[in-house]
């Protein structure tokens, strides 16, 4: 199955607990990542495997990842973090765009398969739980996590508790209509925040700028005209870091819409901390200061009210794994 093992990944300090380690599993569209996590948030062992495309094969893959970790560690529960709509009891996957489950009681199914308590959690909620316990939102009264990758996932922590809404799907911030007459979205609307502020959006903006023949002196533009496959969010970020004018313009556009969207977040939720996480967060030094300034300028009552601290993730790619394990630990301890 091509599993990879990494030992000794660091976590952070956290409260002591009577129960021992749990397994957190981040079930993504391309990989299944499992980790043994202590109650204090330390990642002590991980396993990675590719994500199968059928439901039975995916369930087999998750079970194998957990089984490999259980061969080396004694654990008492499993948390699964995934991008999709869960029911309010966190037992059923209603819909997951990159996974094969549709209205499947995955919690009970995997619990029977693994033989341990299994808890489901939305991946953005899992990241928020981890950042609040051990990372960039530690100590916050009210925190919003904005996970920027292919799209935008989001989570809200109020006084230490995740806010889920009445049916388990809140807050869906990626589909706020932020950009007037913006790009069409698969959800059926136009101008959704994630259509101008995501890893996918970086590429689309770059293609639009290329079509307008802006910045002909750009080495990125020359490379991409000869090989469109070379245009990725990572490539754009690297070129922006090197000062490429086209890449800088693309990142500036991204920062603009990030800041405008964060002003919506400030107006609606009034958090004391916003954490920017996800795959794009690794390039935060390129855009976060500008986004902070734009947010401050657009927030209602700007200059006459406190605004949230806008921070980059402290837990990086481990946030979802740690949060899923924390959710399993807390559920098993009740």
Image (spheres, rainbow, N blue to C red):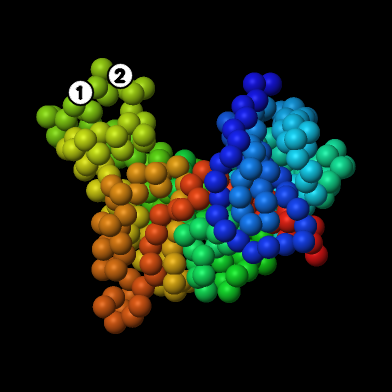
Say which quarter of the image contains residue 55: top right
In space, the residues marked 2 and 1 are separated at their CA atoms by 9 Å
Q: Measuring 75% from the left and 35% from the top, which residue is drawn there? A: 72
The answer to which of marks 2 and 1 sits earlier in the sequence is 1
Residue 208 in view, yes or no: no
**Whole-percent x, y for residue 190 in the image:** 41, 50
Q: The C terminus is located in which quarter?
A: bottom right
**Whole-percent x, y for residue 76 in the image:** 80, 49
**Whole-percent x, y for residue 253 in the image:** 27, 48
Q: Nearer the viewer, residue 228 or 326?
A: 326
Residue identified by numbered label 1 = 222
Q: Measuring 67% from the left and 51% from the top, which residue is drawn there? A: 38
**Whole-percent x, y for residue 220 in the image:** 23, 28
SS class of the residue under badge 2?
loop
Residue 113 in view, yes or no: yes
How would you rate the neighbour count of disc 2 (Cα within 10 Å): few for under 14, some for 14-19, many for 20 or more? few
Q: Judge left or right: residue 14 versus residue 298.
A: right
User: Is the residue 45 above or below the residue 288 in the image?
Assistant: above
Residue identified by numbered label 2 = 227
């Amino acid at each position: 199955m091509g599993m990879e093992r990494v030992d000794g990944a660091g976590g952070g300090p956290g409260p002591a607990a009577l129960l021992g380690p749990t397994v957190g599993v981040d079930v993504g569209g391309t990989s299944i990542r499992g980790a043994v996590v202590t109650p204090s948030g330390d990642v002590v062992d991980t396993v990675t495997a590719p994500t199968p495309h059928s439901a039975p094969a995916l369930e087999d893959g998750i079970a194998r990842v957990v089984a490999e970790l259980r061969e080396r560690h004694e654990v008492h529960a499993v948390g699964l973090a995934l991008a999709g709509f869960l029911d309010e009891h966190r037992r059923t996957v209603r819909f997951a765009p990159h996974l094969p489950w549709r209205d499947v009681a995955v919690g009970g199914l995997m619990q029977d398969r693994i033989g341990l308590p299994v808890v489901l959690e939305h991946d953005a909620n899992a990241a928020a739980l981890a950042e609040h316990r051990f990372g960039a939102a530690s100590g916050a009264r009210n925190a919003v996590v904005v996970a920027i990758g292919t799209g935008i996932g989001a989570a809200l922590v109020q006084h230490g508790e995740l806010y889920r809404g009445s049916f388990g799907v809140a807050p869906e911030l990626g589909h706020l209509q932020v950009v007037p007459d913006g790009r069409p979205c698969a959800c059926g609307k136009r101008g959704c925040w994630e259509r101008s502020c995501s890893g996918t959006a970086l590429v689309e903006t770059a293609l639009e700028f290329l079509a307008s023949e802006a910045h002909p002196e750009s080495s990125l533009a020359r490379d991409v005209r000869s090989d469109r496959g070379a245009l990725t969010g990572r490539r754009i970020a690297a070129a922006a870091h090197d000062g490429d004018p086209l890449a800088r313009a693309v990142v500036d556009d991204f920062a603009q819409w990030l800041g405008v969207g964060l002003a919506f977040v400030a107006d609606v939720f009034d958090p004391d901390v916003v954490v920017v996480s996800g795959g794009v967060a690794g390039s935060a030094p390129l855009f976060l200061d500008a986004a902070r300034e734009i947010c401050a300028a657009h927030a209602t009552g700007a200059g006459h009210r406190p605004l949230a601290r806008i921070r980059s993730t402290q837990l990086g790619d481990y946030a979802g794994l740690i949060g899923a394990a924390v959710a399993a630990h807390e559920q098993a301890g009740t």
